[in-house]
Structures are given as structure tokens and as C-alpha cells.
Image: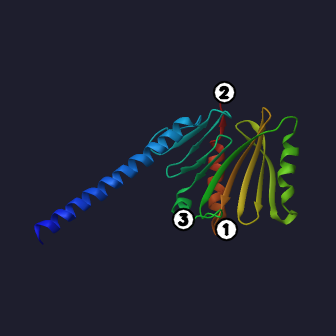
Amino acid sequence: MTRNVRLIIIFAVIIIGGGFAFYLGIKYQGENTNQNTNTEATTYVDSTDVVYTNDQYNYRVTFPEGWAKQDDQGEYVSWLGPVAQEQEVVSELLQGMKIEIWTTDMVGVTLQDAVDAELEVYSEDEILNRSNITVDGKDAIKVKTNLLGYTIATYILDNDVLYKFIGYVGDEQENAKYVAQYSSLLSNFEFIE
């Protein structure tokens, strides 16, 4: 190779590398700006667990290693399990598990009425199970449905706020595995003062 060709290649590598580093710097800065304006916090308890705290709606939940926050809008947050993160084609029906936590102000409504209203969109055969449980000492209703995928939703009404802790499972063959994982995650949901 001639000296000029080598110099051109070296300059091209430097320019491409610098452009990539500049892009990553802007992307990182944009992500930090979005995180700093949010009132919610994600902290790491140890090397394996991630604790998500929502100060606006006074709750926290611990996710195991490998889970990642997908979206956070205050009244709505979603998390993806490791298998769902690896899915190449983005769709609503992810393989693995996706957790969504919704909060809605509900004044003058009972838990039973709120859940009945939520379930009006389902036919009888789409509701697989409905049971009364407790979550962090609060009365709750857990509902399993099958409409375009297997879903487990737990509804909790506390201080005129309806909390919906929803787990979506894309792979019906692994329902038992994900039901156990959902129960484990739900057991880590707690209200804070």
C-alpha cells in the first residue's frame, strides 16, 4: 500500500470512531436527562436485584437480575424479563414475560366494582380464574385471562388509587414457569410511606 492510502484509511477509522463516540455521548446524555426529570428511582440493592421505587404513587417492587425497565411514565411503568429482551421482532405478545404496573385514581369505587369494570371487555371463556388475595397486607383480586396471550393481573385499591400489576406471557407452553415468576415478583410489591 502506498503511504497516501494508509493515511486515508487511518483518517477514515479516526473519523468513524470519533463519530460513533460522539453519538454514544449524545445518546447517554439524553438518557440521563430523561432519568433526572423523572420522580421515580431505580436503585440496586446488591449485584443481583433492582429495586424500582415510585414516589408519586408510594410503592416499590424488586426485580431480579436480568430484568430491565422498558418504559416509565409515572402512572405507568413496564419491565421486561431476560427472554423478552432477547426477542428480535418487537411485538405486544413478547416471548418470556413483561410486567406492567398501572395506577389510576379511583374515588368512591370499591375494589370489586373497579375489577368488574376492567373485566367487562372479556367474555366468560376468556377469564380463566379470579381469586381474592392480599398484597402487602392489602385486599387484592388476581385474575388470569387468555385473550391474545396469557395474562395475570392483580388489582389493589389503596387510598383511592387502583394499582394494576399485570404480567403478560407470550409462550403458553411455559405458563407454569411464568405463573411462579409472576407470584414471586408480586410478593416483592410493597407500599411505602
Position of residue 77 relative to residue 138, above or below, is below
Of labels 2 and 3, the one closer to you: 3
Write the residue at 54% across / 65% down.
Answer: 87
Position of residue 1 relative to residue 180, above or below, is below
Kind of residue indicated by mark 3:
Gln
Q: Position of residue 77 (x, y in %)?
A: 63, 46
Residue 123 relative to residue 170: left or right: right
Mark number for residue 87? 3
**Quadrant where the image shows the N terminus:** bottom left
Q: Earlier in the sequence, mark 2 or mark 3?
A: 3
Write the residue at 61% across / 58% down.
Answer: 97
Q: Which residue is mark 1?
A: 172
Kind of residue indicated by mark 2:
Glu
Nearest the eye: 178 or 55: 55
Q: Position of residue 78 (x, y in %)?
A: 62, 50
Considering every residue shown, the one lying at the far top of the view is 193
Label 2's element? loop
Q: Residues within 10 Å of mark 1 (few under 14, many from 20)?
A: some
Q: Position of residue 58 (x, y in %)?
A: 67, 33
Q: Earlier in the sequence, mark 1 or mark 2?
A: 1
Q: Residues within 10 Å of mark 2 (few under 14, many from 20)?
A: few
Write the residue at 22% across / 59% down.
Answer: 11
Q: Position of residue 138 (x, y in %)?
A: 76, 37
Q: Which residue is mark 2?
A: 193
The Cα atoms of the two marked residues, 1 and 2, are separated by 38 Å
Label 1's element? helix
Position of residue 150 relative to residue 69, above or below, is below
Q: Quadrant of residue 17?
A: bottom left
